[in-house]
Amino acid sequence: MEDFNINYDESQVPHYTLPDPLTFEDGRPVVDAAAWTTARRPELVALFEQTVYGRAPARPEMLVFEVIEEADDALEGHATRKQVAIRLGDGPQAAVLDLLIYLPHARSGPAPLFVGLNFMGNHTVTADPAVRLPSSWVRNIPDRGIEDHQATPAMRGSASSRWALTEILARGYGLATLYCGDIDPDFDDGFRNGVHALYERDDTAGDAWGTLSAWAWGLSRALDYFETDPAIDTARVAVLGHSRLGKTALWAGASDPRFALVISNDSGCGGAALSRRRFGETVRRINTVFPHWFCTNFKAYNDNEAALPVDQHELLALIAPRPLYVASAAEDLWADPRGEFLAAHAADPVYRLLGTPGLPADTWPEVDRPVWGSIGYHVRAGGHDVTAFDWAQYLAFADRHLG
Ligand code: GCU
């Protein structure tokens, strides 16, 4: 096993200088909100595409939504459950993304909603026996009888503690989720499966899209469906994700401005944490163990973070002026909780330039003491997970910003 020299000692964090989001690549300052929106923001989006996540295609022409099921008596009569097949492309390579949606009955008008990818299949998010099992590749879990990469009912509800479904619905929000593996199975196959297979790929292009970029693109396809569903308020869709799927939620929010609010839960390296700090997971470690997540060009920054034209605070800044929540966990050192706070703090000048309150904190807040402006942040007690505490903040933050 390669030695990655993982550092957990604050005194060993290298001295670094962050690129300034409010300075153009040619050194000119960004003088006002218009210069940010029309010129600097697109410049940064292109840099993230070229050097970190890779370039995703536009919305496909062949995009069909098939409502497979609509039941208005779900969850003991409190919600409507919809299961929608998003069909992409045709022929043998066609991909189908299964979207699961719960909408609250207690609401006036179209529902605002949270959307996020799940790790193991829609059926893991809730024990609701009507939820369809994925037919795409899933990770084998021999202890749970999962072999040959086929989903089984054994995992129903296994991730339900991470999705505060009852609470979300009671507060008047819907929840939508889809399995990341429907979009792109999470292993390195040379980009021949999932939605990558729908497109010609130039393997020599260092900026061809990786898996995180494909997952984010899949979230945009869910948004395309929401735009066709009158029961959903498309102007109030919050995208969220945990860990690798938190990295994905941030890139989805940065690259698709239709997401009204973005939540990163413990996203760490390649997500909300600053790469230059090299605390916990590093660029070299993530590119080595997960060679398919980012674009090939990102590998040039292994052990060479200072050469990156961007850092992750600029990813957060791309979400401005839309509300953004960054959540860390105190024991989740692998994800560098302090580096996540520092990135949010370094995104604040862009939020302020755009006339929002930004992040009202200059020092890393105490554990379990959320701070909120248009950027929300907390470091929760405990480890790498999504908990009831996290959801309590997300719901209150959404109430404040989505109304
Ligand atoms: C690994 C990986 C992280 C990632 C995490 C997860 O720990 O190194 O970058 O966030 O898996 O997705 O659970």
Image (spheres, rainbow, N blue to C red):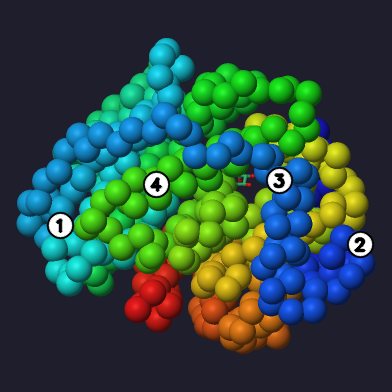
* Image quadrant occupied by the N terminus: top right
Which residue has dot 2 on it? 26
Q: Secondary structure at mark 4?
A: helix
Q: Nearer the viewer, mark 4 or mark 1?
A: 4
Given the image, on which type of amino acid does mark 2 rest? Asp
The 10 Å Cα crowd at callout 2, few under 14, some 14 to 19, many 20 or more, is few
* C-alpha distance separating marks 4 and 3: 21 Å
Work out whether 260 lies above or below 247. Answer: below
Which callout, 4 or 3, points at the residue further toward the start of the chain?
3
Q: Secondary structure at mark 3?
A: helix
The 10 Å Cα crowd at callout 3, few under 14, some 14 to 19, many 20 or more, is many
The answer to which of 322 and 105 lies nearer the viewer is: 322
Q: Which mark is residue 79?
A: 1
- From the viewer's perspective, is 395 left or right of 269? left
* Image quadrant occupied by the C terminus: bottom left
Which residue is drawn at the image coordinates 62% and 21% (left, top)?
Answer: 200
Q: Quadrant of residue 4?
A: top right
The answer to which of 20 and 15 lies nearer the viewer is: 20
Which residue is drawn at the image coordinates 68% and 51% (left, top)?
Answer: 270
Q: Secondary structure at mark 1?
A: strand
Q: Which mark is residue 49?
A: 3
Q: Nearer the viewer, mark 2 or mark 1?
A: 2
Which callout, 4 or 1, points at the residue further toward the start of the chain?
1
Given the image, on which type of amino acid does mark 1 rest? Ala
Q: Ligand 1 within 8 A of label 1's CB?
A: no
Q: Which mark is residue 314?
A: none
